[in-house]
Amino acid sequence: MITQNYNDPYSMEMQQNDLYQSTLNKDAILETTPHYNDKRFEKEQTVFGSEPNNGQYGHKHLHYDYSDRLWQFDYNKAQKATEIANQGSAAPKSCRWYEAYLSAHFGRSVEIEHIIAGVNRSNGYP
């Protein structure tokens, strides 16, 4: 369980045994923007899909990129894709929402098999 003192947005406490549990449910709300103090994400975590069993970061047959890269490459396109995804019925931060977002961004159907979340320890950004 994560608890946060809302008087201090940077203070977070966690019980020892709480780890993020990945899901295969495309409608589940995913923790894709963890706080840099969230100890569950001291190392990147699978938040959607099956855990890779190759001992490496991610599945070999999939392509991974940081979510902010799409905004850096083409801000207007990313903004339009967000608007389109928000008009759909999928809940924000769910796998279905990310599929709608990426499909709108790339102009073709995208099916997500795996999502990893983590924090850049050097600057605190998810």
Image: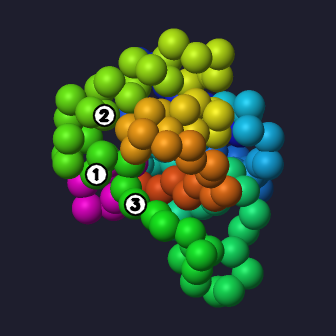
Mark before the other along the chain sequence, 2 or 3: 3
Looking at the rendered structure, the secondary structure element under dot 1 is helix
What is the three-letter code of the residue carrying label 2?
Ala
- In the image, 114: left or right of 6? right
Q: Nearer the viewer, residue 88 or 64?
A: 88
Q: Please, is residue 49 above or below residue 102 in the view?
A: below
Q: Please tell me whether the stretch drawn in magenta is mainly helix, strand or loop.
A: loop
**Which range of residues does the magenta coloring cover?**
120-126
Q: How is the image coloured?
A: rainbow
The residue beneath circle 1 is 69
The residue beneath circle 2 is 78
Dot 3 alpha-carbon crowd within 10 angstroms: few under 14, some 14 to 19, many 20 or more: few
The residue beneath circle 3 is 65
**Residue at figure coordinates x 37%, y 56% from the top left:** 66
Q: Is residue 111 visible?
A: yes
Looking at the rendered structure, the secondary structure element under dot 2 is helix
What is the three-letter code of the residue carrying label 1?
Arg
User: Residue 45: x and y, percent?
Assistant: 60, 60
Mark before the other along the chain sequence, 1 or 2: 1
User: Residue 16: x and y, percent?
Assistant: 71, 55
Query: Contact, CB < 8 Å: mark 1 with mark 2?
Result: no
